């Protein structure tokens, strides 16, 4: 219990940097949105106190909300907290610390009795007030395009916040259920807690490869279809890097399987050091690996491959090299998981054919065909040999 209390809410809910970046990606919240919000911060600092006053003047008109607030001291603290939240919306930093504060807001609101319906109505009121304040910037020379763009960014980050707040609501509800069970049957509840912890560990194990620490084939078949759907919906490129190690069987035969496992572990480290937080690295099986690169075209994927090859030189001697196939999905032409991986595997095989002449790492990419034509793998695929 003491260890649990020493953890942040982000740690308790096992929310990783990758998960945060992925949720931003789902809302199409990009660096452009960050830059817009940050550019408006000074303006919002000047309007924050006025917006807080308007917000709570409207809130306390509702008997249900006024009853929850309860007294002047609580209302004063809420003024301070809300003022800080408004400024944080435009700070431009939306990391684990930011998410932890959103979770704390959800937890506090749940404890003091703010129901989801009251919270959502409050969010809507706040959004309207912020929108009105931004619209009034026309008087300060802001152009209509900039106003529309920053309002869209505000709506995205507020929705991003709301999902974590309701994560905290749900977590509190589950804790309340556990507490009620304790009152009924302490032993059964303690057993359930242990099983919950084991289930979380098993879930983590079930999607991770023990040797490399990367995701496994099962996790890929769950993640990639969702990512393909996101790319299709927002008309974004999605690239897949599929690669294996050249002459790996010979390494296992000559050096032994322990040496082979050590090499695979190092490859996992190379991949982890090379990619972004939003990318999805997977050990597909044996010495085959797959990296999913959202919002990335073939040119970007080739850059990642070159960086991975260069990074490998810090881990391996010249006997370790890769055969790499790269395929792009979208933004116009899309295929499903099986077709995408099959094309990437075919391209990797083309690279494998060149891996002996000359020796070293070889990259094959899908030809860039005109829009509307299906991509196919051929011996004329673009190449990058290292």
Image (cartoon, rainbow, N blue to C red):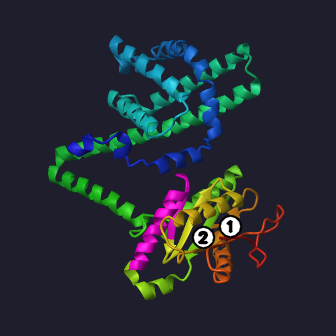
Q: CA distance from mark 1 to mark 2?
A: 8 Å
Q: Is residue 180 visible?
A: no
State the quadrant of the C terminus. Answer: bottom right
Q: Which residue is mark 1?
A: 327
Q: Nearer the viewer, residue 333 or 95?
A: 95
State the quadrant of the N terminus. Answer: top left
Membership of 236 in magenta stretch: no
Mark 1 and mark 2 lie on one chain; the one further toward the N terminus is: 2
Q: Nearer the viewer, residue 225 or 216?
A: 216
**Do residues under tags 1 and 2 come within 8 Å of each other at their CB atoms?**
yes
Q: Secondary structure at mark 1?
A: strand
Q: Is residue 319 visible?
A: yes
Q: Nearer the viewer, residue 128 or 68?
A: 128
Q: Which residue is mark 2?
A: 242
Q: Residue at x 38, y 29 (%)?
A: 109
Image quarter for residue 44? Answer: top right
Q: Residue at x 36, y 21 (%)?
A: 68
Q: In the image, 345: left or right of 186?
A: right
Q: Residue at x 29, y 60 (%)?
A: 198
Question: Where is residue 350 drawn, in percent x and y?
Answer: 68, 79
Q: Main secondary structure of the magenta part?
A: helix
Question: Where is residue 148 drawn, in percent x and y?
Answer: 71, 29
Question: Where is residue 72 drawn, in percent x and y?
Answer: 35, 11
Q: Specify the segment rendered in magenta.
A: 259-283
């Amino acid at each position: 219990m003491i260890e649990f209390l020493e953890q942040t809410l982000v740690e308790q809910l096992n929310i990783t940097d990758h998960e945060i970046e992925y949720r931003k990606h789902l809302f199409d919240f990009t660096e452009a949105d960050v830059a817009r919000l940050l550019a408006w911060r000074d303006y919002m600092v000047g309007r924050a106190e006025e917006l807080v006053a308007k917000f709570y003047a409207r809130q306390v008109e509702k008997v249900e909300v006024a009853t929850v607030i309860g007294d002047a001291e609580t209302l004063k603290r809420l003024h301070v907290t809300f003022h800080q939240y408004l400024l944080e919306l435009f700070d431009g930093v939306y990391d684990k610390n930011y998410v932890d504060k959103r979770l704390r807001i959800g937890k506090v609101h749940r404890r003091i009795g703010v129901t989801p319906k009251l919270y959502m109505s409050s969010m809507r009121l706040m959004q309207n007030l912020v929108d009105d304040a931004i619209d009034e910037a026309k008087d300060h020379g802001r152009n209509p395009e900039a106003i529309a763009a920053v309002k869209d960014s505000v709506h995205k980050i507020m929705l991003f916040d709301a999902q974590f707040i309701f994560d905290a609501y749900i977590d509190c509800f589950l804790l309340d259920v556990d507490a009620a069970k304790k009152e009924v049957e302490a032993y059964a509840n303690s057993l359930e807690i242990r099983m919950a912890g084991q289930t979380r560990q098993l879930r983590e194990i079930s999607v991770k490869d023990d040797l490399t620490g990367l995701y496994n084939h099962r996790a890929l078949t769950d993640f990639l279809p969702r990512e393909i759907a996101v790319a299709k919906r927002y008309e974004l490129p999605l690239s897949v890097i599929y690669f294996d190690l050249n002459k790996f069987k010979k390494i296992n035969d000559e050096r032994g399987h322990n040496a082979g496992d050590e090499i695979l572990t190092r490859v996992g480290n190379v991949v982890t050091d090379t990619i972004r937080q939003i990318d999805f690295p997977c050990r597909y099986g044996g010495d085959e690996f797959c990296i999913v690169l959202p919002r990335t075209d073939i040119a970007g994927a080739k850059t990642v491959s070159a960086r991975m090859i260069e990074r490998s030189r810090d881990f391996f001697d010249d006997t370790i090299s890769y055969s790499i196939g790269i395929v792009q999905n979208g933004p116009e032409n899309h295929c499903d998981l099986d077709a995408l991986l099959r094309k990437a595997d075919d391209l990797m095989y083309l690279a494998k054919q060149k891996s002996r002449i000359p020796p070293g790492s070889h990259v094959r990419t899908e030809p860039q065909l005109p829009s509307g034509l299906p991509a196919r793998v051929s011996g004329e695929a673009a190449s990058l040999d290292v």
